[in-house]
Image: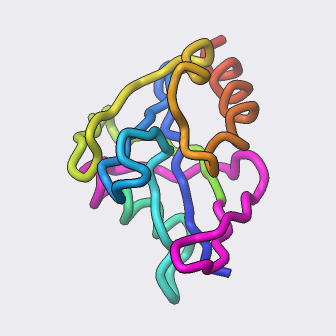
Amino acid sequence: MQVVVGAAVVVDGRLLAAQRAEPADMRGRWELPGGSVEPGESEAAALVRELHEELALPVVVGERLGPDVPVEGRGGAGLLLRFYRCTPVDGAVPRALEHLALRWVGPEELDELDWLASDLALLPHLRAALDASGS
């Protein structure tokens, strides 16, 4: 299975959500930023690379968050999503280079977004992480 990593970027009890621009069937839906782990690349290195490419955001990758989420990818290929908590380096601010929009959300706002189905499984874990970081 191809591993895809997602970043739960949390600052001051708020989570960074990214609105998809592509593909057309996912346009406008919200996700945690990230992407595929390349051959020979660690999951942490993939997250650092992907967040730099998508958001111009340097991050430190922290602990795993939530369960592995198996999903069917394009063309029926099996994907395994893994999520990690990430922290921006030195107060860096993300920019939407590949997304329609970015939004910082608190735990009470998570259900307001139209999340990709693959990210929905993580919402309880995100809510707990945000509640813990906001206290």
Q: Which residues are magenta?
A: 52-81
Give the residue displayed 56% in from the left and 61% down from the top.
Answer: 5
Above or below residue 12? Residue 71 is: below
Above or below residue 38? Residue 113 is: above
Asked where in the image residue 106 lies, by quadrant, the reply is top right
Residue 111 appears left or right of 25: right
Give the residue displayed 37% in from the left and 65% down from the top.
Answer: 49
Give the residue displayed 28% in from the left and 60% down from the top.
Answer: 53
Residue in the foreground of this view, choosing between 74 and 125? 74
Residue in the foreground of this view, choosing between 117 and 104? 117
What colouring does the structure picture have? rainbow
Residue 109 appears left or right of 89: right
Quadrant location, the N terminus: bottom right
In the rendered structure, does residue 69 fall within the stretch colored magenta?
Answer: yes
In the rendered structure, does residue 67 fall within the stretch colored magenta?
Answer: yes
Give the residue displayed 51% in from the left and 32% down from the top.
Answer: 114
On the image, the x and y values in percent for residue 62 come to 60, 49
Quadrant location, the C terminus: top right
